[in-house]
Image (cartoon, rainbow, N blue to C red):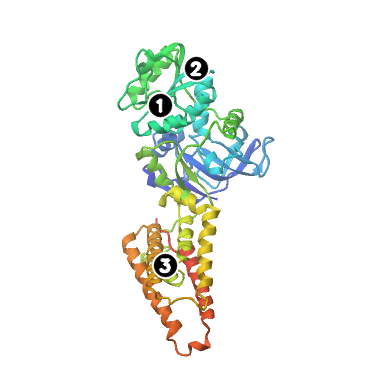
Amino acid sequence: MKAAVLEHYGSPGVFKIKEVSDPELKPGQILVRNRASSVNPIDILVRQGKMKLITGLSDDHLIGSDFSGTVIESKSSLFKVNDEVFGVLNALRGGAYAELLVADEENAALKPSNLSFTEAASLPLVSLTALQGMVDDGKLEKGHKVLILGCTGGVGTAAIQIAKSFETNVTGTCSGKHVDFARLLGCDRVFDYEKEQIPETEKFDLIFDASGNYSFDKFEQNLSDQAIFVSTRGGINDVTGLTRAAIDLVLKKQMKIVLEKPNTADLDKIRELAESGQLKPCISRVFSIENLSEAHSYLENESFTGKVVIEIGLIKTPHVHGTIGKKELEWNYSSGLLIAGTVAAMRSMAAPVVARNIVLNTPDSRFNFRLRRLLSKPGTRLLLNTLAISEMLGDKMPFAGKRTHPLSLTVRALSGAVTAATHAKRARKNTCLAAITGGTAAILASYSLFYLRTRLPGKKVIPGIALGITEDIIMLYLGYLLSKKSPDPK
């Protein structure tokens, strides 16, 4: 199988797609064809080597904990082949950034039936942390007054929704730009921590620090007599924070740090909440497994709400130096621009069809996720194909106008420019220059085709409809080459 592996600790760029041995199955375990995972803060710490005293590092070290996929072999009485499951592996041992994984039966549950694999993979670790932290450690009950610190991160978004499922009053803290999002999730009140402080006189029945950045002392005055302060990390950012948290855990009976414990029963509760609509996935960005480095960099450097999710198809091994030379790569890219213009010249309405194929065959991080979802809709595909077919047929009618009509030529030039720019974006090249090249190629190709239709000696021997059908075949083939075969530089 293929997987994104660490050969050494370091920056986000250390991941490498490699062929590794298939995992072995033991009694009480399931073999899962993994379809999606996610990036959690613990994955960042493991990759950086900050947990190496626990994790160690061997060749082809796999990390990642959340998973969602299909059971392809089972030695468990709880699951059978073809069951769609989701769950979480031990975050320190990892193994989820791979095509296949082995999970203990208690680490998995049936996937929520109303969620895709991608959506389901965003839930396990953060939802278990929120559920166990608030319910098991924090003794959450109906009617409680709850404060959630860092309420728009991965754990925080799950915590809000789980707390509201208990019919509680929820107050959240987050940055100013995420306040409206926190309210949409269900917060009754939201404080912008950059500008506002929780009043010292206000008391809560549970304080859940989903960010893990705060110490017990900072919010001790806001706890009611029987309240618990539960943190995901206890403000442990350095040695001083570690010392302070250790002292608080020993001396303060109201202080707890949640240690997520995977089990099927709690994962089933999460599934039930999701299927009832009380727990919805909050996804910021979706990356392909080939762009795992970009996903880790995004989590480290950007301010966002919700989770970063990884889609895992059949993992493609990226081109490496020596497999395809630089000159060959540049030639393939340049020829792709000419193909874009030629396709547009032949069928101006078919160019968007080709552009759609390029977008949908390009890793998620290169294009806006909403655009991909729009292009994936059956209605969009039907509309673009209908336009393409209508022009293919209309072009062959006796009343079809000249191919170099100014309006037609303008449409073809624009189509060539858009398709070429899309191709350039895929290859991470200058989109403006590519658009000019594609548009020019479309104009030149249009005039060339017009010449063949009107000036070629012996043109009466070849009917116009035959030429049109020939163009259709060439267009489909060139479009296939452009959308499927053009290089994808990393």
Amino acid at pointer 2: His
Q: Is 15 drawn above or below residue 213 in the view shown?
A: below
Foreground pick, 364 / 455: 455
Q: Is 466 drawn above or below residue 178 in the view shown?
A: below
Q: Are marks 2 and 3 in contact (CB under 8 Å)?
A: no
Amino acid at pointer 1: Gly
Q: Is residue 77 visible?
A: yes
Amino acid at pointer 3: Ala
Q: Position of residue 453 (x, y in %)?
A: 45, 82
Q: Earlier in the sequence, mark 3 or mark 1?
A: 1
Q: Residue furthest bottom?
A: 458
Q: Position of residue 29 (x, y in %)?
A: 63, 37
Q: Which residue is mark 1?
A: 212
Mark 3, Cα crowd under 10 Å, few <14 / some 14-19 / many 20+, is many
Q: CA distance from mark 2 to mark 1?
A: 21 Å
Q: Is residue 17 visible?
A: no
Q: Which residue is mark 3?
A: 340
Q: Secondary structure at mark 3?
A: helix
Mark 1, Cα crowd under 10 Å, few <14 / some 14-19 / many 20+, is some
Q: Is 118 drawn above or below residue 326 in the view shown?
A: above
Q: Position of residue 386 (x, y in %)?
A: 53, 63
Disc ID at residue 144? 2
Q: CA distance from mark 3 to mark 1?
A: 51 Å
Q: Name the residue rendered at 41%, 82% in the picture.
A: 451
Q: CA distance from mark 2 to mark 3?
A: 61 Å
Foreground pick, 432 / 251: 432
Q: Secondary structure at mark 1?
A: loop
Q: Tell how many labels.
A: 3
Q: Position of residue 446 (x, y in %)?
A: 40, 75
Q: Are marks 3 and 1 in contact (CB under 8 Å)?
A: no
